[in-house]
Image (cartoon, rainbow, N blue to C red):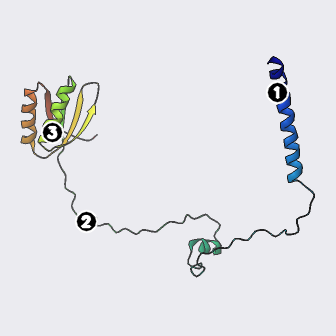
Amino acid sequence: MQKLIKWLAPIVTIGVAIFLTYFLISINSKTVISNNEPLGFQDKAKQANIEKSWLNHFSKTKKLAYSYPVNEIYLKMDLDEKITKTITYKLFANIQDSYQLFCLKEELARYKLKYFLKKDKRGVYLLIYSQNVTKLNNLVKILKDYKIKAQVKLYKKG
C-alpha cells in the first residue's frame, strides 16, 4: 500500500503533463483553416429608429465630455404658500423594565399619537408630535398609574 501511495503522485503528474502536451498540440495545429471570415452578427432589431436613439446622438456630437443618458425632469414649485408651524412637544420618560415600555407603547397607540422612541443612558426618550397639550398631560397622568415618570416640554431644535 505504501509503494502505491509513493508512486501515485509521480504517475498522476506524468499523466497530466502528457494530457496538457497533447491538448496544446491539438489546439495549435499547423493546419490552415480555409474559411477565415469572422462570424457575422445578425441583428433582428428594428433599424427604423436608429436616428432617434441617444447613443447615435452622442456619437455624432463633437463634444469631448462624457454625458450620462438620463431622462430630463422639469419641476415647477409654488413657493408662495404659507408654511405653517406645528408645535412639537417632547415627552421624556424613564422606563425601568420592558413591561413599562409595553404599557407606554399601548397608551401611545390608544391616544393615536405619532412618536419617536430612542433608548439612551438616561432612559427612554420620546418625541411626540401633537398640538394638543391637554391630551399629552392626560397621558402623563395615565402613565403615573403605571409608575412611569414622564414630563411634557416644548421641543426646540438645536
Q: Residue at x 73, y 71 (%)?
A: 40
Query: Which residue is tagged 3?
Result: 108
Looking at the picture, tell me which residue is in the foreground, 32 or 106.
32
- Contact, mark 3 vs mark 2 (Cβ under 8 Å): no
Q: Amino acid at mark 3?
A: Leu
Give the spatial CA distance, label 2 vs label 1.
85 Å
Up/down of 32 relative to 102, above or below: below
Looking at the picture, tell me which residue is in the foreground, 28 or 133.
28
Task: Give neighbour class at mark 3: few <14, some 14-19, many 20+ (Cα, 10 Å).
Answer: some
Q: Residue at x 75, y 68 (%)?
A: 39
Query: Which residue is tagged 2?
Result: 80
Question: Element type at marker 3?
Answer: helix
Image coordinates of residue 139 in percent, x first then y, are 9, 36
* Residue placed furthest toward the top: 2
Q: Give the quadrant of residue 8.
A: top right
Give the spatial CA distance, label 3 vs label 2.
36 Å
Image coordinates of residue 74 in percent, x first then y, are 40, 69
